[in-house]
Amino acid sequence: MSTPGRISQSAFDGARLRVILLLDLYEGAQQQFLDAYELMRNQVASVPGHISDQLCQSIENPSQWLITSEWESAPPFLAWVNSEEHVETVRPMHNCVRDTRSMRYSILRETHPAQSLTGEPASPAPHVEARVGDGVARHALTFTVKPGSESKVAEILAGYTSPQAQVDDTTRLRRTSLFMHGKRVVRAVEVEGDLLAALRHVARQPEVRAVEEAINPYLEQDRDLSDPDSARVFFTRAALPAVHHVVAGREEPAHVSRHALFYPARPGRGTDLAKFLSHQDEAAADDQDSPVYRSTVFQRDDIVVRLIDVVGELDLDPVASLGLKGAGKAAELEALLDGPAIGVEGALSTERNTNRLLSHADMLPVTDRTASDS
């Protein structure tokens, strides 16, 4: 059972996933949209983990549509929605749709026809319990810049003026944390309320657009933010979803420091690595002596980033800071991590390599701003 007061959100709970996509079509685009949907439906049907989908049209406003799909679990859906194949599959829909909103839910309970007839209560999905959240949505973006431009990009990103924190009556930007690891940039945001509304709000702010335009010449992937299709493709490819978040069920320490650790996975092992770190952070949340108070794991393909709030200095307990605590855990991480890509080769069970990994994985903090700083 969950510890009272503990916050825990995860894509690795094993539950089936229900994805809801709300769409508002342009006038006259209905047939074009239906043709694009048929193409997408036929392609997604062969994606591993996909179970079914439905297309629905509003009986009140015919321009409003709903696509729902069911997946065996969240990881295969996240792998699909963040893939290049998905980018190309949905491209034909872009000219049909005025606005979209995507929501993802774990299926915890359901009623079958037989239960409706007998009056039996609905049963929870196997081994899945409701988690306790904190009303905050988390998301990150990651992209790379041209070699040699890292210091200039860091200077630009550190110097921007924070946008207004309050988006609307129910949505507020809570925190933005930005880090770099070599030429890779990671920007993590925390939002109270509607994540999509907050991201759109930020994108419209002149000070943010100025910064984005300023770093454009240094990006490895070209983009034109004045072109909706170019911007959409860039931000789709840059998405780094939060797949796990946990906060220890104890009083928050007076002083914690935020760090981001970069874990490049071996080819094809990104989900396994993210799941490993998530399990380690769940265990740390139950350990009263762990310096890790709060953790969020972000993952896309073989890119894994772990954002942690720790008590004291990061290197006081390298094993706990890296998520290696426990018998055999160093060997498990070693089998999943692309050590040479981060400059660490050999057994992670040695103190030298543990310290080396911590040093090489620790990302450079560029800026970390809370709503009170705005």
Image: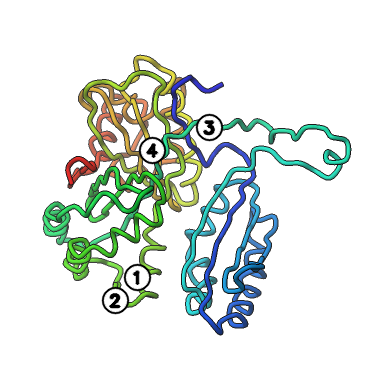
Residue 163 in which image quadrant: bottom left
Q: Give the percent coordinates (x, y) of residue 314.
A: 23, 28
Q: Give the percent coordinates (x, y) of residue 170.
A: 38, 47
Residue type at mark 4: give it: Thr
User: Residue 131, which numbered label?
Assistant: 3
Q: Residue at x 41, y 63 (%)?
A: 236
- What element does badge 3 sit on? loop
User: Residue 231, which numbered label?
Assistant: 1
| Cβ atoms at labels 3 and 1 below 8 Å apart | no
Residue type at mark 2: give it: Ser
N-terminal of the pair, mark 3 or mark 2, is 3
| Cβ atoms at labels 1 and 2 below 8 Å apart | yes
* Nearer-the-camera pick, 60 or 4: 60
N-terminal of the pair, mark 4 or mark 2, is 2
**How far separated are the C-alphas under marks 4 and 2?**
32 Å
| Cβ atoms at labels 4 and 3 below 8 Å apart | no
Question: Would residue 12 be found to the left or right of residue 53 on screen?
Answer: left
N-terminal of the pair, mark 4 or mark 3, is 3
User: Residue 296, which numbered label?
Assistant: 4
Q: Residues within 10 Å of mark 1 (few under 14, many from 20)?
A: some
Please determine whether, in this image, residue 244 is positioned above or below residue 313.
below
| Cβ atoms at labels 1 and 4 below 8 Å apart | no
Q: Residues within 10 Å of mark 3 (few under 14, many from 20)?
A: few
**How far separated are the C-alphas under marks 1 and 4?**
26 Å
- What element does badge 1 sit on? helix
N-terminal of the pair, mark 1 or mark 2, is 2
Q: Give the percent coordinates (x, y) of residue 184.
A: 27, 54
Q: Residues within 10 Å of mark 2 (few under 14, many from 20)?
A: few
Please determine whether, in this image, residue 169 is positioned above or below residue 282.
below
